[in-house]
Image (cartoon, rainbow, N blue to C red):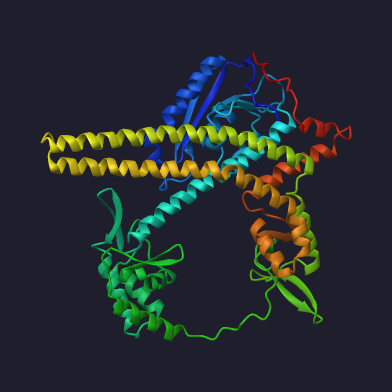
Amino acid sequence: MRKEQRLKNPTRKTAVIYARVSSKEQEKEGFSIPAQLKLLTNYAAGQGFTVVQKYVDVETAKQTGRSGFAEMVNHFKKQYKPTTQKESHPVLLVEKTDRLYRNLKDWVILDELNLEIHFVKENFVLSPESRSSEKFIHGIKVLMAKNYIDNLSEETKKGMLEKADQGIYPSFAPIGYINVDNNGKRHIQPDPIISPLIRILYEWYATGNYSLLEVTKKAQAEGLTYRKTGAKLHKSIVHKILTNPIYYGDFDWAGRRYRGNHHPIVSKELFDRVQEVLSEKGRRRTRQQKHRWAFQGLVSCGHCGCAMTGEIKKGRYVYYHCTGHKGKCPERYVREEELDLEFTEALKAIKIDKEVLDWVVTALKESHSEEKRYHNDTISTLQNQYKKLQDRIDAMYIDKLDGKVSENFFIRKSEEWGTEQANILRQIEQHQGANRSYLEEGTRLLELAQKAVTLYKKQEMEEKRRLLNFVFSNSTWKDGKLTPVYRKPFDLLALTNTAYQKEKAVSSKKDSLFENWLPGQDSNLQPSG
């Protein structure tokens, strides 16, 4: 596989810059935005571009979406007309693949604009004139970038689990509580206005004299509303309040129950009494399901959106049909075997030709070496920051012994720098984990895609369901045809593979397209030396 190189200086003299970080923490640490803008600005000057616009996104948990990305897309749509003519494509400069794309939709949006995109740190330029092989590898990189973003999301979840272990509720305060900052940590405490109403709500229902609807109306009359909007609470929300253990001091997080260090609004005895009343009022016999249909929950009706459910006909044949909860539906019954065949075909869409698979794995290994170098450089920088802080702490300790600084000052600063060191260690761990998982995850996903059809055909229906649930989300069935919805990252793999197969099918020469996918010198690349 050849190394990716920069293109010759383009004749187009204007360019747009885009930079992104995923959290306010990165922005505060000076991790990305200034560094990205400096890198891209210098690159533009070196390539002879005039930067006409810069777009920046700093994403936070409170503000979803990317206003800068949306503005950039609108800019390209207004300023440029999509074209297939060479030397006339608008230019976008970005640091790396994972800075530009968060999901498959972003990739499709930018692809439709016919841009020339310079991934500066990856030393790669993608344009409508790029070869099929480059576009395919770029699709794989988008896939890996999405996986990397997901890994960072998992690290965020891990941090929230650490807070839960400490007894700190790690999310936004539920009704009756408010979020407060305490020594840099976010805690919850009872809302002085709403919490008394929550306690009264529990006391009313504990008497057993009121239904859920009645206590809901009484609570509304007393002024129990949503904190921000002031809207009235519905019965379902009141039920959640009455069954949430957070109000007596515990809380549930990620499938576990934790003992919180926040102040409870009701006693455990009152909470238990409410649960008893709920159980007495809501005790019902439920009919157990006799059959577990293989495709139930995986397919919905394409006409009305209702679920597809199974039914046995003539004592042995399984048919699926729309539940018709929204009224009479025109979709006809479908045999289970027909759905089975459709899902088999859908799995074939993620299987790559053996020759291309070997080549892609090689490309991933080369890409991994660049990714590894980036993470190693970052780890080295973080380690130097950690050592610098430790040197400060050691020097200040000597100053404390010599009486140059007070005990209180030493404790305060050492705690402050110790917190910074803990954050640095977490970042080092994240980069080390990314180093290990980047290649392993990419190769493992590709291998699964290769074996999916064979594995599926060999399994019983129950095992088939497990595999389908891993690859697909809620697909639809309409007019006798399945429209599969792939889970990430299989959606991206299916899209790139489908594009390759279409080009291969229309190739005028039997092997010409495939040859175009194989490594070789690109005429657009600048010769080295």
**What residue is drawn where x is 73% and y is 69%?**
461
Left or right relative to 459: residue 306: left
**Relative depth, front residue between 417 and 8:** 417
Q: x%, y% of residue 430?
A: 46, 44
Q: Quadrant of the N terminus?
A: top right
**Relative depth, front residue between 226 and 337:** 337
**What residue is drawn where x is 14% and y is 43%?**
408
User: Which residue is farthest left?
Assistant: 403
**Relative depth, front residue between 99 and 519:** 519
Left or right relative to 242: residue 69: right
**Quadrant hosting residue 398:** top left
Left or right relative to 390: residue 404: left
Q: x%, y% of residue 233?
A: 39, 67
Q: x%, y% of residue 453?
A: 76, 56
**Quadrant hosting residue 94:** top right
Q: Is residue 304 visible?
A: no
Looking at the image, residue 492 lies above or below residue 330 = above
